[in-house]
Image (spheres, rainbow, N blue to C red):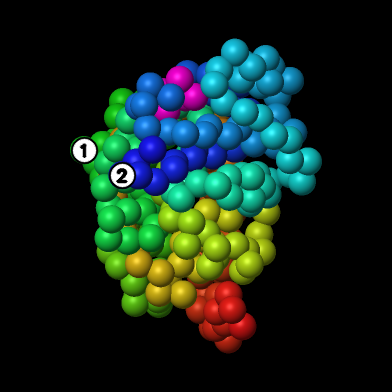
Amino acid sequence: MWNGQRLAVVLPTYNEHLSIAECIRGFDALGIVDDILVVNNNAHPDTSPAVAPTVAREVFESTQGYGAAIRRGLRETVDADLVCVCEPDGTFDPADLLKLLPFTSDVDVVFGSRTVQTFILSGANMGWFLRWGNWAVAKLTEVLYNTVYLSDVGCTFRVLKRSAIDDLSPQFVGNASSFGFEMMLLAAQEKIPMVQVPVKYQERVGESSVTGSQSKAVKLGLQMIAMCLRMRLAPQRSAGK
C-alpha cells in the first residue's frame, strides 16, 4: 500500500515475453504494490509461462490494441485506490514509481516523461525525431488545452487515482496505440489535476511494434495531432452528462 491506499500495477503485453518477468519482479520488490495485473493482449505464446512463476495475475483481452488492454486492466483493478500503468518492455524502471507516487497527494493523474535528456539512458530508442516530435505535440496540447507543462505525449508510465479513472473511463473511445494520448487529452479537457514527471528511459528488450519503425512512428504522430485538434474542436461533455 501507499500512504494507506491500495496500489495496483497494470502491465499490458503483446510482445514482451523476454522482459515481463523481470518487470514484475521489479515492481514486487518495491514492497508497496498490492496487485500486479498482466493483460495478455493476444501476446506471444511464451508470455504466460513467463508470468506464471511470478506474483502477478494474468487476464486475457482478445480485442487487439494497447488501448483495449489498458481499458481492460482498469476494469479489473476496481479495488485499487491508485493504479499505475506501465509497459513491461524494459524501457522503464519500476523503481521510478517512487518518483510518481508522491505527487498523488496533490493531483489525480501523474504522467511520466521520457524526453528529458538527463534520463535518456544508453541504448534507449529516443533519437532526435521521437524526442522532438513528442515535445512538439506536447506543446501543441499545452497551448490548445491551456494545461500544465507537458514534454511528452507518448510516455506510457503513469499513475491515476480511482476518482480520475471513474471520471475518464466512460469517455474512453480508442483501443489502439494512441489511447495513452487520448487519456491525457481527456484529463486536460476535464480539468483533472495532473502533472508530468521525468522518468528514466532505457533500452527496450526486443523490438517495438510501433516505435521500432520510423514510418509507424510518423503515422502515430499524425494520428495524435489529428486527435488533439479534433477533440479540442468537438463540443465538450463531462462524464456525468
The verdict on residue 25 being magenta is yes
Q: Say which of 124 and 73 sits in front.
A: 73
Return the residue found at the far front: 4
Q: Does residue 181 show up?
A: no
Residue 217 position in % (x across, y down): 54, 47
**Amino acid tagged 1:** Thr
Helix, strand or loop status at disc 1: helix
Residue 190 position in % (x across, y down): 46, 75
Q: Quadrant of residue 114?
A: top left
Q: Which residue is mark 1?
A: 118
Q: Residue at x 73, y 35 (%)?
A: 60
Q: Say which of 12 and 8 sits in front.
A: 8
Position above or below: 41 against 30: below
Q: Say which of 233 and 40 sits in front.
A: 40
* Cα gap from disc 1 to disc 2, whole angstroms: 29 Å
The verdict on residue 81 being magenta is no
Q: Which residue is mark 2?
A: 3
**Amino acid tagged 2:** Asn
Q: Say which of 218 and 171 sits in front.
A: 171
Q: Residue at x 44, y 43 (%)?
A: 6
**What is the count of numbered marks?**
2
Query: Is residue 45 rendered to the left or right of residue 223?
Result: right
Helix, strand or loop status at disc 2: loop
Position above or below: 96 against 227: above
Position above or below: 58 against 226: above
Given contact means CB atoms under 8 Å apart, are the residues at marks 1 and 2 in contact? Answer: no
| Predominant secondary structure, magenta span | helix
Circle 1 Cα neighbour tier, 10 Å, few/some/many (<14 / 14–19 / ≥20): few
Write the start and end of the magenta stretch as one range: 23-27
The quarter of the rendered structure image containing the C terminus is bottom right
Q: Does residue 75 show up?
A: yes
